[in-house]
Amino acid sequence: MLRTTPETTPHSAGPLPAPPPASAPEPSPVPSPAPPQERLGRPFHMHLSSVALSNLVDGMVLVGVPLLAVSLTRSPQEIAWLSTLFWLPWLLFGLASGVLVDRLDRRTVRLAATAGRVVLLGAVAVLAATGYLSLALLVVAMGLYGLTQVLVDLSARAIVPQLVPSSRLAAANGRTMAAERVFDDFIGRPLGGLLVVAGAGWLFGAAAAVGVTVVLLLALGLTGRFRPGDALPGAAAGPEGSTESGQGTEPSGTEAQPSGTQPESAKAPAGVVPAEPAGAWREVRQGLGFLVGHRVLRPVAIMASAANLAMAAYLSVFILWVVGSGSAVGLTTDQYPLTMVVMAAGAILATVVIEPLKNRLPEVPLMLTGWMAQVPLLVLPVLWPRLDVLLAAWFLSGFCNMTGNVLAMTLMQQLTPNHLLGRVNGATSTLAFGLMPLGALAGGFVGERLGLPVVFLGAAAVLGLAVLYAMLAIPARGAGTTGPDAGHAPRPVPSPPWVRTPLTAGRDLRPTDPSVQRVLRAGALGGGPGLR
């Protein structure tokens, strides 16, 4: 009989297999540190400074000129001509200016337009000092100033994606719009009101002097090439707070490219034939074709056109509702800029909180909700024409409007390829701002015949219908779904046959916001992927 030992059994003469070792508990994963935030860089901050001072001039002029006009006439129709001529260049020259911005160096375009603005303001200052300034000359001056505004704004917007990393576009746009509101509404408009009291010559002379500073900033501070096909000299490298200069740097892990060359990431994908030089009209059609064929940008542009039509009618005669002894609110000339300051305060608050809001809430619904919330806020000062009601409504309106605007600008910059950005921006702005002259004329006409409250309530109704249209028109199919293509752009939809442009060249086509991803997966892009 076999003896059994710990190494044998009655059925085996060999040793038993060793017991499996006790499995050690797996170590809990150590969370990796968050990647350092890419910084915006020195070129962007030079651009931001020039934008701030440009808007200081805007605030001085856009509040000073109407206040001068109110001292000359109380006719709503005559006052409305100031807004009409200011916005008319967007309708007449917006598309052509977009082509110009996509053909030439964007910094050079902005520099030349700002220099032209300085010459205009200096000439009006001389006319005011010599006593030759009249209401008709003020109207003409506003039209010419509006023409410079088209080129300044389009080139300033188109250059931002060439200055900052795509991951910081929302922050860059938020800071840019915050600077616009602070220097336009907080500083420029109260300063313009004070300078009107001193005299028209002081108003236009001071504005021209600030414009000279902007020219120097652009000429000496923001260096480099900013054509659509150039390397991105302002793409920031390194974490926020790095001590290295952002001028002419590339993102971490890439090699700097020679000036005027494209980095590998910015070259056209395989199989995409680069566009050949096209005529001006063909380039205009490329921008329009991309916008009209895009199922996200198209309803936003249509909504913006109708909304701006309504707001132009509202604001063209609003000064008559609040300023003067015969007005409903009864503000003095010195008090009127206070309303703009309060609206700017709400807008500044929005720029501070927009990035965390964007990271926590769906982007597209947040944008549309911000715009829709303005409808009741426009009605409140009409129903209760008191200063406290006006200030509260304007503060909230500034917050809601800025929330929608920052998100809309970020979406459009992400969805539009860089080489089309000027043209698509020009097409969008032409549609968005082109109806504003008609709105201003309509506001003056209706206000003259039916009264100012009819203008205000009608404008609020049109704004509400416009935003409702966008809510219904922007595709929402596939909301809340997930799949293997989550976070990736869908297959590009063919462009019209006359658009032979590589719509995917040099762009990161993977927006990170879940609501944008759902719109993309729902087939929301027509005319090519990418968002502006």
Image: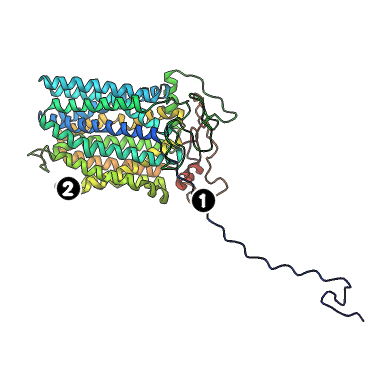
Name the quadrant of the C terminus.
Answer: top left
At 21% across and 23% down in the image, what residue appears? 121
- Residue labelled with disc 1: 481
- Relative height, residue 183 to residue 109 (above, below): below
| SS at badge 1 | loop
Count of marks overlaid on the render: 2
Q: Amino acid at mark 2?
A: Leu
At 22% across and 30% down in the image, what residue appears? 83
The answer to whether residue 135 of the structure is visible from this angle is: yes
Query: Foreground: 195 or 316?
Result: 195
Is 306 on the left or on the right of 159, as rendered? left
Query: Foreground: 528 or 478?
Result: 528
Kindly identify which numbered label has been placed on residue 145. none
At 42% across and 36% down in the image, what residue appears? 164
Colour scheme = rainbow
| SS at badge 2 | helix
Find residue 252 and report its horizontal and vertical position in percent: 51, 38
Q: Residue furthest front?
A: 243
Density class for disc 2 (Cα within 10 Å; few <14, some 14-19, many ≥20) is: few
Q: Amino acid at mark 1?
A: Thr
Density class for disc 1 (Cα within 10 Å; few <14, some 14-19, many ≥20) is: few
- Residue labelled with disc 2: 383
